[in-house]
Image (cartoon, rainbow, N blue to C red):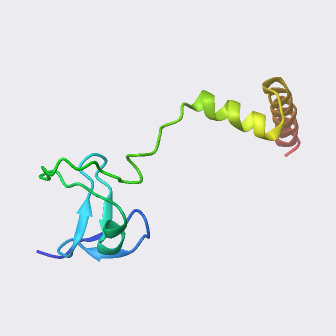
């Protein structure tokens, strides 16, 4: 029976599965002992009633359409302009392949 190594999702430190670490019960992310001190990571058998502050569980998920709209606004480009640019680039790519 060998020792498996786990990578901390925060700092990317590799540590043995027999060491001191935490695994978030909700998203199953693994944290080394240093990073688990920074966050409140609740294991499956924790019944303290404390809320998890796992940095991955507490992130709000963003719908792709919302993210695209935000990116277009940041770039000051309309969806129509982006589509036109895509089509022009796509045509150039097809012409280049035909010449090859």
> Is residue 45 or residue 53 the one in the foreground?
53
Q: Residue at x 83, y 33 (%)?
A: 77
Q: Residue at x 24, y 69 (%)?
A: 21
> Is residue 31 or residue 83 the one in the foreground?
31
Q: Residue at x 29, y 73 (%)?
A: 33
Q: Residue at x 29, y 76 (%)?
A: 15
Question: Horizontal and vertical percent for residue 95?
Answer: 88, 37
Question: Horizontal and vertical percent for residue 93?
Answer: 83, 39
Horizontal side of residue 98 vs 4, given as left or right: right
Res 99 seen here: yes
Question: Horizontal and vertical percent for residue 2?
Answer: 16, 76
> Toward which corner of the image does residue 29 lie, by quadrant?
bottom left
> Is residue 71 or residue 42 the one in the foreground?
42
In this view, 67 is above or below 50: above
Residue lying at the far front in this picture: please name it: 49
> Is residue 61 or residue 40 the one in the foreground?
40
- Image quarter where the N terminus lies is bottom left
Res 7 seen here: no
Horizontal side of residue 8 vs 20, given as left or right: right
Horizontal side of residue 1 vs 9, given as left or right: left
In this view, 59 is above or below 67: below
* Figure disc tally: 0
């Amino acid at each position: 029976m060998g020792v498996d190594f786990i990578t901390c999702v925060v700092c990317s430190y590799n540590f043995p599965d027999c060491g001191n670490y935490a695994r978030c019960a909700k998203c199953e992310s693994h944290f080394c002992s240093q990073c688990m001190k920074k966050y409140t990571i609740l294991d499956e058998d924790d019944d303290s009633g404390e809320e998890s502050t796992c940095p991955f569980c507490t992130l709000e998920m963003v719908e792709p359409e919302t993210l695209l709209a935000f990116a277009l606004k940041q770039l000051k480009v309309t969806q129509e302009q982006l589509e036109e640019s895509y089509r022009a680039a796509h045509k150039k790519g097809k012409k280049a392949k035909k010449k090859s």
